[in-house]
Amino acid sequence: MSLTVGLYVIIFDDGGVYKHWSLFIDGPTDAEKIILHVMSSSTRYCFDMRNSNTHKSATLLEMIHLCNMDTSKISMIKNVAKKWLSIMNIWAITVRTMSLTFWMT
């Protein structure tokens, strides 16, 4: 029988105006509990992946269970999350360029 872990959307209240949303892989040990998220400052995005036990977070508002997945899928989830960063950066650059072009004409 293969091992499975939970995949969640987690929502934090870090004191700002907006809530912070991340993906959480609930591995069997603390070392295998992984948070995947994109940090941003205006239109500059940075992918962040870290080991953290969300269950112990004081700022956790909600955990939304998406599915249980085989542990062999963890690498795939990490790769997909990293690829979304590239898409977000391209989108941000395109929007910024279009805005500048519009206002300069």
Image (spheres, rainbow, N blue to C red):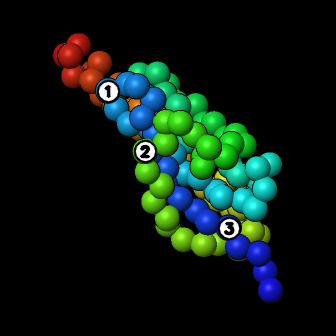
Quadrant for the C terminus, please.
top left
Q: Position of residue 70 (x, y in %)?
A: 71, 74
Residue at 29% across / 18% down in the picture?
100
Q: Secondary structure at mark 2?
A: strand
Residue 93 against residue 29 in the figure, above or below: above
Q: Earlier in the sequence, mark 2 or mark 1?
A: 1
Q: Earlier in the sequence, mark 3 or mark 1?
A: 3
Q: Which residue is mark 2?
A: 61
Q: Secondary structure at mark 1?
A: loop
Q: Earlier in the sequence, mark 3 or mark 2?
A: 3
> CB of mark 2 within 8 Å of CB of mark 1?
no
Front-lying residue, 51 or 45:
51
Q: Is residue 88 visible?
A: no
What is the spatial separation of the Cα atoms under label 3 and label 1, in whole angstroms?
A: 32 Å
Crowd tier of the residue under label 3, counting other residues whose Cα lies within 10 Å: few below 14, some 14–19, many 20 or above: some
Residue at 49% across / 50% down in the picture?
10
Crowd tier of the residue under label 2, counting other residues whose Cα lies within 10 Å: few below 14, some 14–19, many 20 or above: few
What is the spatial separation of the Cα atoms under label 2 and label 1, in whole angstroms?
A: 14 Å
Say the numbered circle drawn on residue 17. 1
Q: Amino acid at mark 3?
A: Val
Q: Amino acid at mark 2?
A: Leu
Q: Which residue is mark 3?
A: 5
Quarter of the image for residue 4 reads bottom right
Quarter of the image for residue 67 reads bottom right
Residue at 42% across / 35% down in the picture?
13
Residue 50 against residue 105 in the figure, above or below: below
- 38 sits to left or right of 18: right
Residue at 49% across / 42% down in the picture?
60
